[in-house]
Amino acid sequence: QACSAAGRWASSIWTPTIRESGIALSLCAMPWEMLGTPDLLPVQLPQLLVAAPLGDIAGAALRSAPLVVLLMLQLYAVGASDSDVLQPCSKALGFNETAGPKDRSSQDLQFCVEHHKRTCCERNHTRQVLGSFARFSYDRSAQCGQMSRLALCSFCDGDVGSGVKSRANRVVLCPSFCSRWFDSCLDDFFAPSGSGNEMQPCGPASLVCSPLREITEDPAEFCANVGDFSMGEHEDEDCFDGIPAATARGKGPRNPWARPAPRGPPWWRRFMPSSTAFQFQGGLPKWIEGCVPGMVVGSVVLIISWYVWRSD
């Protein structure tokens, strides 16, 4: 019914000359049908220009403007709905494949805050990334440390986690991002790691360290050997360029989460008198609270030893 009403409205806005030409518009038709049959347009257009006055054609064009607007809105809505479809998180990267990227901001993630609004990472994943970054934060230049943090946190990017910007278990970095990371660490020291050409930042336990510029001159080799990364061949392919998916696509659906209940007092406090005479202003210092169990056990052992000594 809606389509037929729209058709009657569309036919009412065209001049008789154009209606008789055989060009029909329908809101329920495909875009080519809304524009007319392609094979007939080249033939009928000159006839329309001759048969119809210029004023009628201009007036009909103005009256058909709402149809063009509706068509553009429809195409935009279809494109937006296709882009908003969430892809499941990648099992190859160790994520939960039954869900897509979620908004986990202000929850329990511990690192990579720029990706919290659209990420597949959970608490344990961010702890792993934080542990990897600890090696890059030891005796690093500020530029190398910052770029290393961005690269390592790409693991928690929503598009990387859903497999759009990753291959198997490797994050695909854009050539420009990989080159920026390489250039920022040229003067920092790295050491061999394991077998092959793998490398890691130089640390206290490293035996042989060299500046990165003396190890390799190829940014792709650096990105592939310093972690689970690979460099894309072209800048326009799906690769991580440093811009979080939360910024490019917006935040994902909110992840259901409940804040854990606060921990109760230590077990030994249940045996303390509740009298105000034993209450301390502001509570016991933390170092005393940690020593109380040992003090109790030591006191019991001392009493038993004294009793045994007295009985002898």
Image (spheres, rainbow, N blue to C red):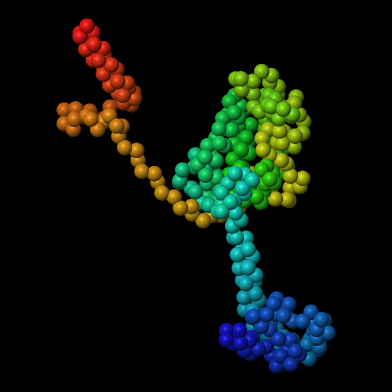
Vertical order, 151 against 309 (above or below): below
Image location (x, y in percent) of residue 102 = 53, 52
Which residue lies at the image location 65% right of the left edge and 50% below the top edge? 163
- Towards the viewer: 140 or 285: 285
Left or right? Give the position of 262 relative to 161. left
- Towards the viewer: 235 or 63: 235
Task: Count how many numbered circles sit on residues in the image.
Answer: 0
Which residue lies at the image location 59% right of the left edge and 44% below the top edge? 94
Q: Quadrant of the C terminus?
A: top left
Image location (x, y in percent) of residue 302 = 26, 14
Vertical order, 33 against 227 (above or below): below
Which residue lies at the image location 23% right of the left edge and 8% below the top edge? 309
Image location (x, y in percent) of residue 155 = 61, 42
Image location (x, y in percent) of residue 184 = 67, 32
- Towards the viewer: 10 or 85: 85
The answer to which quarter of the image holds residue 213 is top right
Which residue lies at the image location 81% right of the left edge and 88% below the top edge? 47
| Residue 115 visible in the picture | no
The answer to which quarter of the image holds residue 131 is top right
**Furthest-top residue in view?**
312
